[in-house]
Image: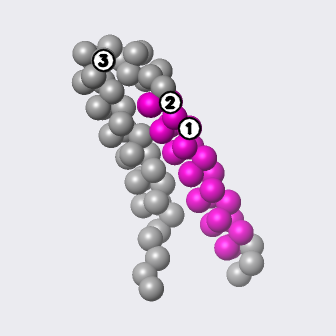
Amino acid sequence: MSRISPKIRIAMSLGSWVFIFIIMLFVADGNFSQALFSPLSMMIGFLSFINIMVIIVQEKNKNDSA
């Protein structure tokens, strides 16, 4: 089973937030602050942040147990 590297997992997590942010930027007619602080963008950003923290902890635990 091939394992996806942590850097790629983090990039995918950030990429999902960037994708939603760009969509919200189009929806908000280019208003940066309205797109950044929209509920959907903030929720995806928060979930991406939590996901990145989980990836870091998993890698730390994997390195500590090895």
User: Which coloring applies here?
Assistant: one colour
Label 2 SS? helix
Residue at 56%, 51% in the rendered image: 52
Q: Amino acid at mark 3?
A: Ala
Q: Amino acid at mark 1?
A: Phe
Residue at 48%, 54% in the rendered image: 10
Q: Which residue is mark 1?
A: 46
The quadrant of the image that shows the C terminus is bottom right
| Image quadrant where residue 55 sits | bottom right
Label 3 SS? loop
Q: Amino acid at mark 2?
A: Met
Q: In terms of sequence position, does the residue under pointer 3 or pointer 1 come before the other?
A: 3
Q: Which residues are magenta?
A: 40-63
Q: Are marks 1 and 2 in contact (CB under 8 Å)?
A: yes
Q: Which residue is mark 3?
A: 28
Residue 66 - label: none
Main secondary structure type of the part rendered in magenta? helix
Label 3 to label 2, Cα distance in Å? 14 Å
With respect to residue 26, does 46 lie above or below?
below
Q: Which residue is mark 2?
A: 42
